[in-house]
Image: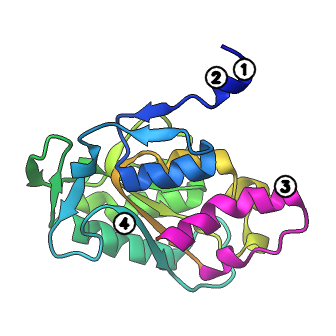
Amino acid sequence: MCISAQSRKAVPTWRLHPTLCGFTSEVYYEGRLHSMPGLERQEIRGPTPFAGSGLFLVEVAHEGNQASAPEEVDVVDRVVRSLLTVRWVGRKGNARALVADDVLVLAPYNAQVGALRRRLRDAGVHRVGTVDKFQGQEAAVVVYSCTSSSPEDAPRGMEFLYDPHRFNVATSRARGVVIVVASPRLFAAECRTPAQMRMVNGLCRFSELA
């Protein structure tokens, strides 16, 4: 098979709900990724704003935060604790209580990870870390705290915060629900080059679809 034909070959996923797969496929796989049968059953059931499946955005206004954001820690704490009261439906259609190990909490910076770990410890949520630490793992729900107040506040610059590979890994750990917690200023980045435009596309497209 020629290289160009190979690059267009469909890529299956046994993890992502079709809604999550649609986002990941469009932004990162040139439309080649597709969900396997049964994954459409994966969803949250219960009294929560995050019932069902798909992409959710929680905007949190804050100023001057770089590698840690107390405002986002507060919001993530409330979100995670609310999730521990609902039920999870798996690929085979079986419903059960959603437990702490079903939730993966991610952030780009170690300082924010430390703050989130301290806050969530008494809730029994221990799967808290950077994207790099949890690459290759999965969970029913992923909560991603973007942390920085603005592109200008981001340690290591836009290239780190908006890194397409990092955001792809973060959002594709989830089986059914992805919740991004972020400052609204992150969606108004002033891009000066085509490369920067491509860089911020994932986060901005997420906000459009959520």
Q: Which mark is on residue 195?
A: 3
Whole-angstrom CA distance, mark 1 to mark 3, is 25 Å
For label 4, the residue is 119
Q: Write down the quadrant of residue 109 in the picture.
A: bottom right
Q: Quadrant of the N terminus?
A: top right
Q: Which amino acid lies under the numbered mark 1 shown in the image of this protein?
A: Ile
- Dot 4 crowding, Cα within 10 Å, few <14, some 14–19, many 20+: some
Q: Nearer the viewer, mark 4 or mark 3?
A: 3
Whole-angstrom CA distance, mark 3 to mark 2, is 25 Å
Query: Which residue does the image show at 79% across and 62% down from the upper left?
Result: 197
Q: Nearer the viewer, mark 1 or mark 3?
A: 1
Q: Are marks 4 and 3 in contact (CB under 8 Å)?
A: no
For label 1, the residue is 3
Q: Earlier in the sequence, mark 4 or mark 3?
A: 4
Q: Nearer the viewer, mark 3 or mark 2?
A: 2
The percent coordinates of residue 61 (x first, y second) are 56, 86
Could you say whether the residue bearing mark 4 is in a helix, strand or loop? Answer: helix
Whole-angstrom CA distance, mark 4 to mark 3, is 37 Å
For label 2, the residue is 6
| Magenta span includes 202 | yes
The percent coordinates of residue 7 (x first, y second) are 66, 28
